[in-house]
Image (cartoon, rainbow, N blue to C red):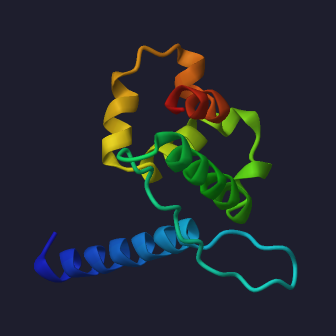
């Protein structure tokens, strides 16, 4: 592959990545509704009143799930939902989660993962 072919290849790769990123950012909206990017919830604060912090995070997470239509995903996508949850919960809480002694179901089910985090 010469330099020009490599340049073309990289341009194609960049275009494909842009399309993938756009699909991830923009969620399906009901017919006729504007499609808006959905900001992720604020990370779970691990200092202060933990019960209040968790309640706020959980409500924010539930709204995020509805806004992104994750609530319509089949149960076979639960492990992916948990991955999204762990990606937005914040590093301090994620580190704690990874140290919990959890069952496979608790690591693969959003409701059980949230219960374990609580």
Residue extending farthest to the front is 49
Residue 16 position by quadrant: bottom left
Q: Residue at x 70, y 53 (%)?
A: 70
> Total of numbered circles in the picture?
0
- Left or right for 83, reference 79: left
Question: Where residue 35 sits in the image (x, y, percent)?
Answer: 70, 81
Residue furthest to the right in view is 31
Q: Position of residue 112 (x, y in %)?
A: 62, 27
Spot occupied by residue 34 in the image (x, y as percentages of width and height): 75, 86
Q: Is residue 82 above or below residue 116?
A: below
Quadrant (top left/top right/bottom left/bottom right) for the N terminus: bottom left
The one of 54 and 104 positioned closer to us in this rendering: 54
Identity of the residue drawn at 60% across and 19% down = 105
Q: Looking at the picture, does residue 89 appear above or below residue 14? A: above
- Residue occupying the point 31% across, 80% down: 11
Q: Is residue 86 left or right of residue 23?
A: left
Viewer-nearest residue: 97 or 47 = 47
Residue at the location (45% across, 48% down)? 89
Nearer to me, 23 or 52: 52
In the picture shown, does residue 66 fall above or below 87?
Answer: below
Residue at the farthest left position: 3
Query: Which quadrant would the C terminus be assigned to in this image?
Result: top right
Counting from the top left corner in percent of width and height, residue 49 is at 46, 45
């Amino acid at each position: 592959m010469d330099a020009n072919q490599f340049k073309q290849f990289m341009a194609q790769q960049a275009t494909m990545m842009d399309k993938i990123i756009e699909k991830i950012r923009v969620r399906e909206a009901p017919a006729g509704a504007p499609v808006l990017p959905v900001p992720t919830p604020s990370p779970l604060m691990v200092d202060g009143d933990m019960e209040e912090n968790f309640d706020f995070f959980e409500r924010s997470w539930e709204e995020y799930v509805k806004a992104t239509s994750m609530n319509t995903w089949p149960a076979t996508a639960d492990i992916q939902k948990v991955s999204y949850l762990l990606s937005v919960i914040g590093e301090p809480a994620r580190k704690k989660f990874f140290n919990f002694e959890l069952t496979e179901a608790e690591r693969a089910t959003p409701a059980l993962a949230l219960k374990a985090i609580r």
